Structures are given as structure tokens and as C-alpha cells.
Image (spheres, helix red, strand yellow):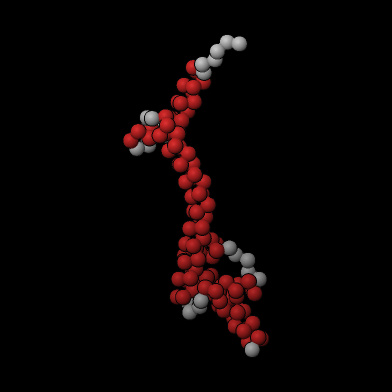
Amino acid sequence: MPRVRKGAARTQARNRILRLARGYYGSGHTSKYKADYAVIRAGVYAFRDRRRIKRDMRRLWITRITAACRMRGARYSQFISGLKMSGITLNRKMLSQIAIEDPKVFDQLCQMAVKASRATVAKAA
């Protein structure tokens, strides 16, 4: 069998890695070995942070809802449990949008939630 030296395939593989590493600092975009490592690390960070951004956004929405509830004299936990008892199924993203863009509607939601949570506390006592 003839000896295969991978001339074109090796060049294409190297160029593929260097294309992915374009714009990286130092020899991270010129050296194939360092570019290979940098591209792998970048992929790991991207995978991790696609999940982390979801967590961070949920934390932001909860912080906004908490602030809006405190302005109306209610606690976040009381508000959320009251909404569940009232049968209102709005996610935290929508609740934070309502708190920012339509405070009057959020006032009504807050009153309904507090009333529902106080009614269950009164039943339990």
C-alpha cells in the first residue's frame, strides 16, 4: 500500500482550528496547539454559560418582583404562594415585566395574592 502523508487534510484541519480561534489573544490565534486548546476551553465556557445565563435571568426577575412586592407591603414568598392559591399561573418573567410596565395591574395581583395567602393562614389557625 502507498504511504499516505495527509497533506491537504492536515492543512484543512489546522485552518479550521485557526479560523475558530480568530481574534484570540497572543499566540492563541496563530499556534495550532494553543489555538486548539483555546477553542476547546471557549466551547466549555460557552456550554456552561448558556445554562448560567438562564439562572442569572431568573434571579433578576425574582429581585424585581421582590422589590415591587416590598413597595406594596408584601413579601415575595407570600406573593408567590398567594398567586398559586388564587390559581394565577404567570411565570416570573411575565410578573417582572408587569411590575415594570403596568404597576396598576401588579397592584391588583399583589392584593389578590395577599388576600389568598391570609385566608389560608386564617384557616390553619
Q: Position of residue 68 (x, y in %)?
A: 47, 71
> For this view, does 112 lie left or right of residue 69?
right
The front one of 93 and 45 is 45
Q: Position of residue 3 (x, y in %)?
A: 55, 13
Would residue 6 be visible to someone looking at this image? Answer: yes
As displayed, is residue 106 above or below residue 18? below
- The residue drawn where x is 46% and y is 26% is 14
Residue lying furthest bottom: 125
- The residue drawn where x is 57% and y is 10% is 2
Q: Position of residue 71 (x, y in %)?
A: 45, 75
- The residue drawn where x is 49% and y is 53% is 53
Q: Quadrant of the N terminus?
A: top right
Number of marks in picture: 0
The front one of 65 and 34 is 34
The front one of 8 and 98 is 8
> For this view, does 83 lie left or right of residue 48?
right
Q: Quadrant of the C terminus?
A: bottom right
Q: Position of residue 28 (x, y in %)?
A: 38, 35
Would residue 108 be visible to someone looking at this image? Answer: no
